[in-house]
Image (cartoon, rainbow, N blue to C red):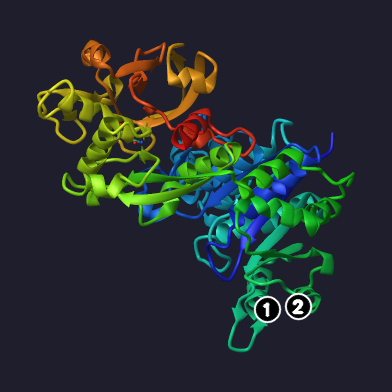
Amino acid sequence: MTDVKYVFVTGGVTSSLGKGIISASLAKLLQARGYSVTIQKLDPYINVDPGTLNPYEHGECYVTLDGAETDLDLGHYERFLNVPTSQANNVTTGRIYQSVINKERKGDYLGKTVQVIPHITDEIKRRIKLVGSGDKFDIVITEIGGTVGDIESLPYIESVRQLKWELGAQNCIVIHLTLVPYLSSTGESKTKPTQHSVKELLETGIQPDVLVLRTERHLNEDIKRKVALFCNVEEKAVIESVDVSTIYEVPIKMLEQGLDRTVLKKMGLPIETEPPLTEWREFLTKLKNPKHSIKIGLVGKYVELPDAYKSIAESFIHSGALNECAIDVEYIHSEEITENNVTDRLSGFNGVLVAPGFGSRGIDGKILTAKYARENNIPFFGICLGMQCAVIEFARNVLHFEGAHSTEINHKTKYPVIDLMEEQKSVIDKGGTMRLGGYRCIIDKNSKTFEAYRKTEIIERHRHRYEFNNKYYDDFKNRGMVPVGINPESGLVEIIEIPDHKWFVGVQFHPEYSSTVINPHPLFVSFVKACIG
Ligand code: GLN
């Protein structure tokens, strides 16, 4: 067996250059060449995981099948690779320190001063190697969050330096992603920020093997040669990443420039024929040549930052392409929806989706949206809190349970149609304590959901504390909001539908986390179909 190879992806000049997309694209190409690849993200913040972060801080919190609350980049990895990630694929500084401090308290370092080097860096290296252990992967791609030069990322960079030394140049390569800005006043693309950024990396003892240059405009060969010369990188290893209309185009662009070939060559791995990427290209063709078009209103409260709903947006891209349909998703602030303007605000849409969320802000707008969709026979998709709002609305306006609510918002409500789950009642800590990850669900054959999945047993990912209150099960069922998906172990209601409606589905789980390019999520596919009409 050959050794596991490690590829590190660092970033320079600015944040948000798309290290996650470059990592995922490279992984896709290597996977298409027959290698088993996984991606890991190292995040420099001190939260143990992003589960306690407000989406405004860091975008969506992505949940893995094994119940880890992780960085949204893991979503990209899964969407590109179509392979589930796990807890080990996302590590934060908080988690590293937590392990080291726990070991210190146990006496594992007895007598020693515990320091960033070697103890923190050893723990970082252990976490990196852990992903590569167990013979599962040929190549591990590790993305280092943040920008080179940040105080926070120093221990990570130092760990990469040590690993490169320990494992040898062929087993450990570094791809550095930078920005080449274009100055319109002089009509030039400038390489100086890249040169500085590489110097900064060199100061930490790391010579990058490959440079990926983010740019608005094509870079000519002279510029690439100049970067290669001044940054001490092979000419072939200077790759441009020019802005494209969809992130799913990036693997093709990287293939054209031989990023994967360069990486394989540096690692001493065989380079066989070009991967055809047939399914991927078919997806892109469909995406770019839609036959239909629809408008969907996404009602949520974090709409100022579209990254807060990243997986939902991507799920629409996957399901839109499959249906050969261009989807214009308009983000609507739930706080702006009132009794007076709801018709005006929502009448132009082919379908509405009420987003997940926490707390009371904007809840009334979400409940009004569910009412509007139900009464006007407009396709409605409620996810997690979105489903809970549909239940509350139905209780108030169809069952006439006055003041019905979720106890998350009003713990004194007379009709707690959404209530805290039993096992949550004793929970005090906020981090990692929700009902998280994959749970089974048995689907009623007589439902739209069954038509979508074409199977009766599914596993979907969860992230919530509150739940449909089974005390009212018969009330809902008898009046036309039917629980059609149940967790067999707990009896918890996971899916509700209104059979008399064109398409009205609420799910307690998060289908958006498991939609991929190759496997668009069946519920999104079915919802989009209903919206096309
Ligand atoms: N706040 C709700 C709960 O905890 C819904 C959570 C969500 O939408 N992810 O149950």
Is 224 located above or below residue 292 in the figure?
below
The residue labelled by disc 1 is: 191
> How far across and down, in percent of the image, does residue 384 sit?
35, 32
Q: Kindly indicate the quadrant of the structure image that contains residue 222.
A: bottom right
Residue 223 tag number: 2
Going 51% across and 15% down the picture, which residue do you hit? 457
Asked whether residue 240 is in view, the answer is yes
Which mark is on residue 179?
A: none
How many neighbours does mark 1 have within 10 angstroms: few (below 14), some (14-19), or many (20 or more)? some
Identity of the residue drawn at 25% across and 31% down: 375
Q: Quadrant of residue 256?
A: bottom right
Amino acid type, label 1: Thr
Left or right: 111 in relation to 197: left
Q: Up-down: is 337 above or below 499? A: below
Q: Can you say which quadrant of the picture contains the N terminus?
A: top right
**Image height of 422 relative to 192, above or below:** above
